[in-house]
Structures are given as C-alpha cells and as structure tokens.
Image: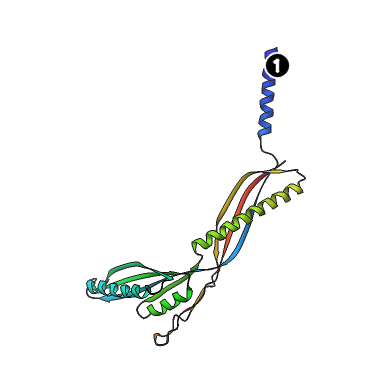
Amino acid sequence: MLRSILLYGLLLFALTAQADAEPYNRVDFQVDVSREISNDLLTTNMSVEFQDKQPARVAQHLNASLNAALQKAAAYGTVKTTSGSQNTYPVYGKSNQIDAWRGHGEIRIESRDFKAAGELIMQLQSMLQLSDVQFGIAPDTRANVESTLVTEAIKAFQNRADAIRLALGAKTYKIVYLSINNGGMSPHPIAMLRGAAVAQTAMPAPEFASGETRITVQINGTIEIQ
C-alpha cells in the first residue's frame, strides 16, 4: 500500500513538472526598421570589340586597347579599375567556314567619387564602349547602417513586447526566441546617366543621379508573458 502511494506521488509530481515546463502565454511577432541611404558606390563595365581574319591581330588589338585604358585610369587615384573578361571566338560564314575572329574585352570601374569616375569614362569612351552603370551601397557604409538599425530594431522589439505585456495585463515577460535578419536591401530604380551618348567631338563628362537604397532590418521573436 505504501509503495503504491509513493509511486502515485512520483507520477503526480512528474506530470506537474511536465505541465509547468510546457510553454504558455507565448506571443510571436516581428518588427521592421528601415532607412533610405543615398547610393555611394558606382560600378560600370567598359568594353572593346574587334574583328579580323587573324586571331593574333584580334588579341593584339584587344590587349593594346585595354592596356591603354588601364594606363589612363591609373591617373585617377579615387577610381578602382580592374581587368574584366576577355575572349575571342570564330565568326562563321554561309559555308559554315570560319570567315573571321571576333574578340571582346572589358575593364571594370568602381568608385565613390562620381565626378572622377565620370571624367575617366569620358576619357575612355574614345576607345571603349560603356556597357552599363550601376549604383549601390559600399560594404562599409552598409555595415555601419545595419549596426545602427539592429540597435533600433531591438529597441522597437522591446517596446512592442512591453505593449503586448500591458495589453494582456501581465507583470513581466521573457524572450524565448529572437532572430535578426539584416539582409533586406531594396534599390530604387532612379539612378540615371546623362551625357554619355553625346558625339565624341563634344563629349561632356557624364553626370550621375545615383538614387537611394532602402536598407531593412527585421526581428522575429517570441516572448512569454508572466
């Protein structure tokens, strides 16, 4: 009889402990904070193409053009210029025979100094074609903004948790789960390039309107009110 009572007591204690350990009064929610940041990094590719019967002359022309471009770019200390892709491929005629060889080479331009980049592009357009211009946020700028937004998002999460606690008449709360996502970037498609298509005889330096990017930090979490 005593043994049965002890077993019953242990079973009741285990069930009570299990019930106490089960989650209760938990609320899931998320907060978002965003900021519009002016794009501070310009990247573009400039390319050259050449066709000839001899592949060696194609390669020679590409190398000469790209090397000359890199030499001009070296005078712009605030502009980073690197070699891009370079390839040569056959051009086939009607008889499916190789009629010529065509080569394509690129350089990549990257800078925060839009004025200097525009001047360099103007200089290079006499020998290279401007492929595209893109604007974005520099890595260190993004990191600094995201650090600030994380702090703001955590504060917003705490304020929301307090509001939930008060609305439900609880005394306090504890954070059960917290996830921070700082990968949100939405570039606004308003970046513009002006003056790049003017005839070379009267070519001005391109003017840029870089636009803005929205950076967002999101926090998903669970609180348990008590």
> Viewer-proximal residue, 202 or 6?
202
Q: Residue at the location (70% across, 13% down)?
A: 2
Determine whether 150 is above or below 223 in the image: below
Q: Judge from the rendering whether residue 57 lies leftward or rightward of residue 21; answer left or right.
A: left
- Residue hosting label 1: 5
Q: Dividing the picture into quarters, in which one does residue 149 lie?
A: bottom right
Determine whether 51 is above or below 15 in the image: below
Q: Judge from the rendering whether residue 162 lies leftward or rightward of residue 112; answer left or right.
A: right
- Percent position (x, y) of residue 122? 41, 79
Q: Residue at the location (29% across, 73% down)?
A: 62
Q: Residue at the location (46% across, 79% down)?
A: 206
Residue 34 in sight in this render? yes
> Helix, strand, or loop for circle 1?
helix
Q: How many discs mark residues in the rendered view?
A: 1
- Percent position (x, y) of residue 196? 44, 80
Q: Dividing the picture into quarters, in which one does residue 170 lie?
A: top right
> Viewer-proximal residue, 83 or 52?
83
> Viewer-proximal residue, 150 or 53?
150
> Viewer-proximal residue, 46 or 74?
74
On-image quarter of the N terminus: top right
Determine whether 203 is above or below 14 in the image: below
Q: Dividing the picture into quarters, in which one does residue 94 lie?
A: bottom left
Q: Residue at the location (63% across, 56% down)?
A: 152
On-image quarter of the C terminus: top right
- Percent position (x, y) of residue 220? 61, 50
Q: Kindly identify the amino acid type of the residue bearing the numbered disc 1.
A: Ile
